[in-house]
Amino acid sequence: MAFRHPDRDQIRIEDVLSALGNGVRLAVVRILDAGGEHNCTSVLNTLGITAKSTMTHHWRVLRDSGVIWQQPSGRENLLVLRRDDLDARYPGLLDAILSGARTDEGHAAARAR
């Protein structure tokens, strides 16, 4: 199965922000930001999600918005963050969003104590 991915110049800020405005998708991007290729199952396991079908919509939104590459590899799909493309289109945006997510997580953890 071949997936459609927008070219770098087709990535739109409103699509990226919409994709990253969802907590599950933001968590996926945080995992992928570590670098390299990740298979869908490893991301699901990290998130604690057991049903692959739960993520089908999220993968599509991230892919169609230009946030990730999703490539078939055997019986799995490999996911890669399109950091170079996002940084070229919107310098500093991804860093700011990921930094904000880490800050929010720190504040939530502090309130839980």
Image: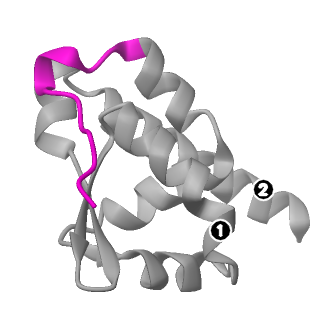
- Point out the tag, 2 or 1, that comes first from the N-terminus: 1
Query: Could you tell me which residue is drawn at 78 percent across and 56 percent down?
Result: 108
**Residues rendered magenta in the picture:** 1-13
- Left or right, 87 with respect to 62, comes to left
- Left or right, 42 with respect to 5, comes to right
> What colour scheme was applied to this rendering of the protein?
one colour
Q: Quadrant of residue 39?
A: bottom left
Q: Count residues near mark 1 (Cα–Cα under 10 Å), then give few for <14, some for 14-19, many for 20+.
A: few
Front-most of residues 107 and 92: 92
Looking at the picture, does residue 24 appear above or below residue 113? above
**Camera sees residue 102:** no
Label 1 belongs to which residue? 53
Q: Amino acid at mark 1?
A: Ser
Query: Could you tell me which residue is drawn at 23 percent across and 85 percent down?
Result: 74
Residue 108 got which mark? 2
Q: Count residues near mark 2 (Cα–Cα under 10 Å), then give few for <14, some for 14-19, many for 20+.
A: few
**Camera sees residue 101:** yes
Q: Is residue 47 magenta?
A: no
Dot 2 falls on a residue whose secondary structure is: helix
